[in-house]
Amino acid sequence: MTRIIALVIALVMAAPAVHAREQLERAAAADLREFNIRGVDVSSLETAQLAAITAIAHQRGKRGGKRAQIRSVLRGPDTLRGLLFGGRGN
């Protein structure tokens, strides 16, 4: 998973910020569709959330576990992940 996160960060830093954000939003939207998670406006998510969704979707592991992790990322600051990584902005 560390390699995937490093890859996502490298991709984000390689392109201009606006284009990178758009690419990350498109990737996260596709990942959410893949895991049948609906009703999420990816443009309202923080960059860290978008990167986490993409990283989780492409890591090894069971599909159900990935879906649960992605839903946890979407819940925001009221989760352990939110307490650890929340409030840092885009």
Image (cartoon, rainbow, N blue to C red):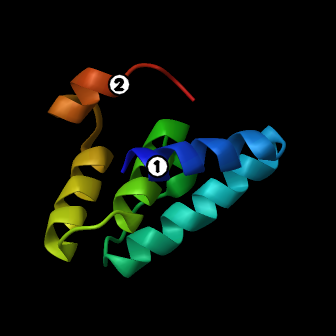
| Residue type of the residue flagged with mark 1 | Arg
**Residue sitting at 66 percent across and 44 percent down?**
10
48, above or below 64, in the image: above
Q: Which element carries disc 1, helix, strand or loop?
A: helix
- Do the residues under discs 1 and 2 have CB atoms within 8 angstroms? no
Residue 38 on image: x %, y %? 35, 71
State the residue lying farthest toward the right: 16
48, above or below 3, in the image: above
Mark 1 / mark 2, whichever is N-terminal:
1
Q: Neighbour class for label 2 at 10 Å: few (<14), some, many (≥20)?
A: some
Residue 36 on image: x %, y %? 31, 78
User: As drawn, is 15 to the left or to the right of 49?
Assistant: right
User: As drawn, is 72 to the left or to the right of 41?
Assistant: left
**Where does label 2 land, which residue?**
86
**Residue sitting at 68 percent across and 50 percent down?**
11
81, above or below 57, in the image: above
**Where does label 1 land, which residue?**
3
Out of 40 and 15, give the one closest to the viewer.
15
Out of 15 and 26, give the one closest to the viewer.
15
State the residue lying farthest toward the front: 3
